[in-house]
Amino acid sequence: MPLAVTITGTRSTGHREMSWYAQLFASYLGPFAEDQAHFHVGGAKGIDSLTLLWIAGNAKSKITIVVPGTVAQQPAEARQAISQCRSRIAEVVELRAEEVRTPAYHARNRWMVDRSDMVIGFPKEDAPETSGTWQTLNYGTERGKPRLIVPV
C-alpha cells in the first residue's frame, strides 16, 4: 500500500522564485512521488497550492485536498490551483467548519495527519514554533509519525 503523506507549510512563499520551489519539491517530494504516495494537501495558498501544482504535474500519486470550510471559502490562488489540477485530484474533503479561523485550520491539519503515515513540513525559516506548520509537525510527532522538515 502506498505511503500516505501530509504536506504542510507556510502561506508566505513570495520570498523565493518558483524555480527554487520546483527544485526543492523534486528533491524532497520526488522520492515519495516515485513510489506513488498518497498526498494529503491543505487547500490554502502558499506551500499548499505550490505542492499541489508540482505533484499534479510531476507525479501519478493520489492527491486528496482538505479544506477547513469549503473550497469556495479559500483564497483565489488556492481555488485556482485546485481548479487547474482537478483532473488529478482524487478527493476534495470539505470539513465545513462554521468559522474558518485558526481552530478550523488546526482541525483540518489534525484530520490530514490522522490519515497519514508521515508529515512533510515546509516552514518559513523564521516561523515561530506556534505557526500552523509547526503545530501540524508537532501533532504528527505526538501521534508517533515520522516527519521531514524542509525550511523555506
Image (spheres, rainbow, N blue to C red):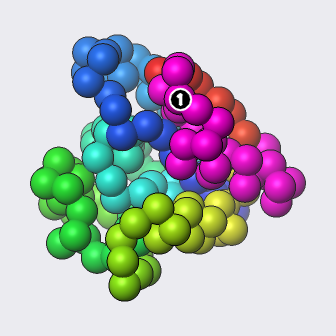
Residue at the spot of label 1: 127
- Measuring from the top left, give residue 52's x and y in whole percent: 34, 47
For the magenta stretch, what is the residue range? Answer: 121-146
Q: Is residue 5 left or right of residue 71?
A: right
- Residues 72 and 26: in front is 72
- Amino acid carrying mark 1 in the image: Ala
Tell me: residue 121, above or below residue 4: above
| Residue at x 51% of width, y 54% of height | 39
- Measuring from the top left, give residue 27's x and y in whole percent: 52, 21
- Residues 14 and 51: in front is 14
Specify the quadrant of the image occupied by residue 26: top left
Secondary element at tag 1: loop
Considering the image in quadrants, where does the N terminus appear? bottom right
| Residue at x 33% of width, y 53% of height | 44
The 10 Å Cα crowd at callout 1, few under 14, some 14 to 19, many 20 or more, is some
Query: Can residue 121 be seen from the camera position used here?
Result: yes
Query: Can residue 64 be seen from the camera position used here?
Result: no
| Residue at x 72% of width, y 55% of height | 139
| Residue at x 43% of width, y 37% of height | 10
Q: Is residue 54 left or right of residue 124?
A: left
130 inside magenta stretch:
yes
- Measuring from the top left, give residue 57's x and y in whole percent: 28, 40
